[in-house]
Image (tube, rainbow, N blue to C red):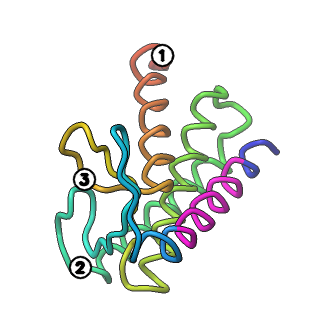
Amino acid sequence: MIYIIIIILGLILDRVSKIYAVNNFIENPIESPFINLTYLENRGAAFGILQDKRIFFLIITIAIVCYLLYYFYKSYKTNPTILNTALAMIISGALGNFYDRFVNGFVVDFLEFSFFSFPVFNVADIFVTLGCGLMIVYIIFIHEDK
C-alpha cells in the first residue's frame, strides 16, 4: 500500500537526515543565501514552546498517532487519496520526532531559512506541515458534510 510506503519513506528520510546533521553540522554548520544547515537540540515543540516537557510530548504523540492510525485503518478505503496521503505524512512526521524525543530526550533540528527569521526545523516537521496543508486543502475544497 502506497500510504505505508509514505510513512516508512518519511521515517527513513528523517532518520538519515538527522544522523547526517549530527555527524556533520555540530562542528561545521553550513550557511548559504537560502538555507543554513546547522544543529539544534529542540527540547520543546514548534517554535520552541513548552521546553523540557518531554513526557507530555511522548504521551500526546502516542495518543494522536494511535487515533490517526485507528481512523486511517477504519476509513482508508473510503477516504479520498489526498486525505490518506495527508494522514500518512502527519503520522510519519509525528513518529520521526517521537523517535528523537524517546531515544535522545530532544528533537534534532538542522534546517534554517537564512533570508528571514523562522525556527530551525527538520524533515519530520516538513512531513507534518505538508500533511496538514493537504488536510486543509481537503477540508476547504473537497470535503462535503454528509
Instruction: Check disc 1 and report the residue beneath it.
Output: 144
Please say if 54 is above or below 49. below
Q: Amino acid at mark 3?
A: Pro
Q: Is residue 139 above or below residue 67?
A: above
Q: Residue 73 vs residue 25: left or right?
A: right
- First in residue order: circle 1 vs circle 2: 2
- Identify the image quadrant of residue 48: bottom left
Residue drawn at point x = 57 percent, y = 49 percent: 71
How many C-alpha atoms fall within 10 Å of the one at disc 2: few (<14), some, or many (≥20)?
some
Q: Nearer the viewer, mark 1 or mark 2?
A: 2
CB atoms at circles 2 and 3 under 8 Å apart? no
Q: Is residue 11 magenta?
A: yes
Look at label 2 and name its amino acid: Lys
Snapshot quadrant of residue 16: bottom right
> SS at mark 2?
loop
Please rate how many residues cluster around mark 1, counting C-alpha atoms within 10 Å: few if below 14, some from 14 to 19, many from 20: few
Most common secondary structure along the magenta stretch: helix
- The image shows residue 41 at horizontal and vertical percentages of 32, 75
> Looking at this rendering, what residue extends furthest in the right direction?
1
Residue behind mark 2 = 53
In the image, 24 versus 86, the foreground residue is 24
- Please report the bounds of the magenta region as a residue range: 6-20
Q: Are marks 1 and 2 in contact (CB under 8 Å)?
A: no
Q: Position of residue 92 (x, y in %)?
A: 57, 56
- Residue 27 position within the rendered picture, expressed as x and y whole percent measured from the top left: 39, 77
Q: CA distance from mark 1 to mark 2?
A: 38 Å
